[in-house]
Image (spheres, grey):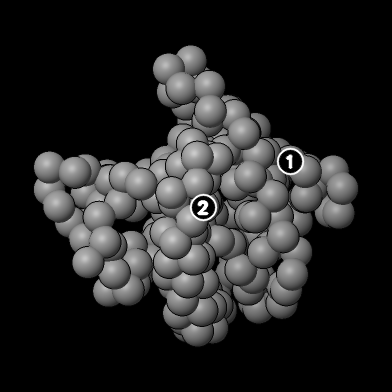
Amino acid sequence: MHIEIGIIDPVRLALANAAALSLVASQVPAIIRNPFIIPKTALAAVIFTVLMQAWHFPVGPSELHLIGATTVYMLFGFAPAMLGFALGLVLQAFLFEPADIPHLGVNALSLMIPMIAVHYSFGRRLFDARLNDRFNLSKVLRIDAVYYAGVSAMVGFWLMISNDAVAMTDWATWVAAYFPVFLVEALITFGAVTVIKGLRANGLVSRMTEVNRLTFA
């Protein structure tokens, strides 16, 4: 989902940075209500960074790599996932890829806007005890599909407003190449939540994750 440097002009980059900062600021009330979001955000950022740095491969106008979006969302919740993306991208840019610093807003929006779509479509149903929507692999695949469709749409959007004409066939090639990554991530999420489920009686695990809010078969 990283957009190659130089494709987007400085004015649009500035607007993207402002929009990303606004989304980060929108999560501040959640932190005030629940200070445990801060350590959850740190854990989300670490998991996100490890998965992102573990493997990445350039394809067309962007890259293929693991994101861990549904993993951090299912384990830590909506606000930590949103803030974890922002923190993780900042850490990665300053520690590993300084050239990505101007694109922090673009990359953050590419991750956060699809997460908003996930949360307000199917995601929050899994955390609502009244709905009794059970966690299983099919639900994870559905949420991952929504998320990666959103990421693909965001990359397409950035390419449409870019300075350089990028063939939509190149974008389509990148989208198609991401399909196996989407399946792998769904399995990682399902496995991680299943493992943590077995530890949820532990007080620290209970406080530091959202697994107790999920309904299992």
Q: Earlier in the sequence, mark 1 or mark 2?
A: 2
**Amino acid under label 2?**
Val
**Res. 198 in view:** yes
Q: Nearer the viewer, residue 136 or 1?
A: 136
Residue 77 is drawn in which quadrant?
Answer: top left
Does 207 sit above or below residue 96?
above
Q: CA distance from mark 1 to mark 2?
A: 17 Å
Left or right position of 193 against 51: left
Question: What element does badge 1 sit on?
Answer: helix
Left or right position of 170 against 102: left
Residue 198 is drawn in which quadrant?
Answer: bottom left
- Quadrant that contains the N terminus: bottom right
10 Å neighbourhood of mark 1: few (<14), some, or many (≥20)? many
Q: Residue at x 31, y 45 (%)?
A: 213
Question: What element does badge 2 sit on?
Answer: helix
Left or right position of 38 against 29: right
Does 129 sit above or below residue 142?
above
x, y percent for residue 88: 68, 45
Residue designated by label 1:
90
Q: Mark 1 or mark 2, which is nearer to you?
A: 2
x, y percent for residue 103: 70, 46
x, y percent for residue 131: 12, 48
- Quadrant that contains the C terminus: bottom left
Q: Nearer the viewer, residue 122 or 37?
A: 37
Q: Residue at x 58, y 62 (%)?
A: 67
Q: Nearer the viewer, residue 115 or 34?
A: 34
**Res. 168 in view:** no
Q: Which mark is on residue 72?
A: 2
**Amino acid under label 1?**
Val
